[in-house]
Amino acid sequence: MTLLASIQNIFNSRCSLLKKTFALYCLLDVLLVTESTAQNIMTVGSGASMAIQNGTSLNIQGGIQLNDGSHLTNSGEVSISADFTDQSISAYNYGSGKFVFTGSSTQNIFSPNQFERIDVNTSILNLSSNIKSNTWYLVAGKVTTNGYAAIATSGAASAVTPDPSNTNFANSWFNGNLQRYITPSSVNNYQFPVGDATKVNLLEMDNLSVLPLTGVSYVTASFGVKAVWCIHQLTMAECGTSILMQHQLVANMISNYFLMDSMVYPIMRLEF
């Protein structure tokens, strides 16, 4: 049975039970469920609300589309095997629950809203916008940012965390831009598992509590090709030129490198 048929059948026969179990509003003229020929899509129409209660899991064998004017509150767990598209114009917070991306092929994600937790357990999670989440939990699959940024809005060290099966982020990492909010006065270490399409190159910021950074609220990291660092204590000198730049890491195109913006590091460790 298709996603559309199964949900409509539940709505028609067990609407009150569904509302108690999943806290979905049981009005077919409010919650619009459609499907496409390429993949099953659950569409929440304008003016509709959908809520997943604490302790509840909703497994969608397909994707989600939230039209502008709809609202999704997730206090439990939502698993998605296809694309996630939110066309909201006015941004809001999805709630305290987590979203688990579990597709066997590339999944696309587009949203202006704030996630609490995103679990990546897919082939490729393809960003079609900047995506903000307090926590990114990486199990398997690359997060490809395409010029956008995966943003960890929590300043906790655990805001980017590997699953125990994802040792040293070898199975899941960010292919593109990872932006992390930081609280260096209280957090000593941050990891940036960024790489390319084939492997991760883990960057770590260490000993931040010894020499806390000031005036910096976030760091953006990405991995590039063919450059080398020329690093001095407080002034970063561009390789091969006499240009000096204060409080900025500057790279020349020679060997593999990390791009970090607006940072000076007490200790920086690169793993290739």
Image (cartoon, helix red, strand yellow):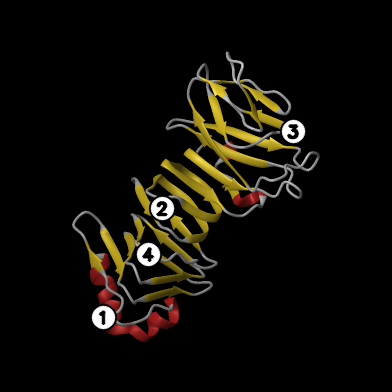
Residue at the left extreme?
A: 37
Residue at the right extreme?
A: 210
Q: Which residue is drawn at 23% across and 71% down?
A: 5
Judged left or right of residue 93, residue 263 is: right
Q: Residue at x 26, y 60 (%)?
A: 40
Q: Which of marks 1 and 4 is nearer the N terminus?
A: 1
Provide the residue designation for mark 3. 266
Q: Is mark 2 on a helix, strand or loop?
A: loop
Looking at the rendering, in which quadrant would you find the N terminus? bottom left
Q: Which amino acid does label 4 sit on?
A: Ser
Nearer the camera: disc 2 or disc 3: 3
Nearer the camera: disc 4 or disc 2: 4
Residue at the top extreme?
A: 240
The percent coordinates of residue 126 (x first, y second) are 38, 45
Q: Separation of disc 4 and disc 3 at Cα?
A: 41 Å
Provide the residue designation for mark 4. 88
Q: In which quarter of the image is residue 263?
A: top right
Provide the residue designation for mark 2. 102
Q: Can residue 91 be seen in this view?
A: yes
The percent coordinates of residue 197 (x first, y second) are 42, 32
The percent coordinates of residue 256 (x first, y second) are 52, 22
